[in-house]
Image: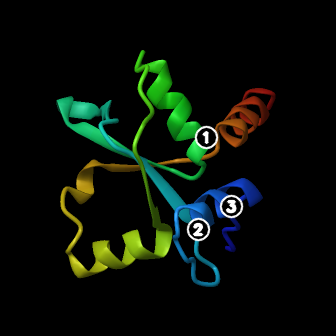
Amino acid sequence: YNLIPSAAASKDAKDTGTTLKEGDVPLFIIERLAFAGSGGQPQVPLFLEKADGVTSYSRLGKSDQPIVRTTSLLDVLDSMERGTRPAVGQLEFYGNADDVLKADEMSSSQ
């Protein structure tokens, strides 16, 4: 598989000073944003698109500007393999909202 970030995601990462290695994908973390997971554990979303993270933050009724941190898929996977990523069980990857809707539409039409 080749994961290719959108042009918007690549630009957003570059705007934050994040340098991506070849084949890497930026991930966006919105500070103070978590969702309820199974068993009541908070789930920290890792967004493939900055705009999806900002939209999720605003849907919670927050009027302030969210603080967005940028990392990359390779950095997250590397820290998971080395065991240096705290609360790794609380991380969830969130795909592009449009792609998720299209996939749902395709699976329901079969």
Label 3 sits on a secondary structure element that is helix
Q: CA distance from mark 1 to mark 2?
A: 15 Å
Write down the residue under mark 1: 51
Residue 67 x %, y %: 40, 43
Q: Residues within 10 Å of mark 1 (few under 14, many from 20)?
A: some
The image quadrant that residue 33 belongs to is: top left
Q: Of helix, strand and loop, which one carries label 1?
A: helix
Alpha carbons under labels 1 and 3: distance apart: 12 Å
In the image, is residue 48 above or below residue 64? below
- Tell me the quarter of the image containing the C terminus: top right
The amino acid type, in three-letter code, at marker 3 is: Lys
**Which mark's residue is nearer the viewer, 3 or 2?**
3
Residue 88 lies, with reference to residue 21, above or below; the image says above
For the residue pair 27 and 43, the one nearer the viewer reads as: 27
Give left or right: position of 101 versus 62.
Answer: right
Which residue appears at 38% of the width and 69% of the height? Answer: 76
Q: Position of residue 14 (x, y in %)?
A: 61, 67
Q: CA distance from mark 3 to mark 2?
A: 12 Å
- Disc 3 designates what residue? 11
Q: Nearer the viewer, residue 62 or 36?
A: 62
- The amino acid on which the numbered mark 2 sits, given as a three-letter code, is Val
Residue depicted at 73% across the width and 35% down the height: 107
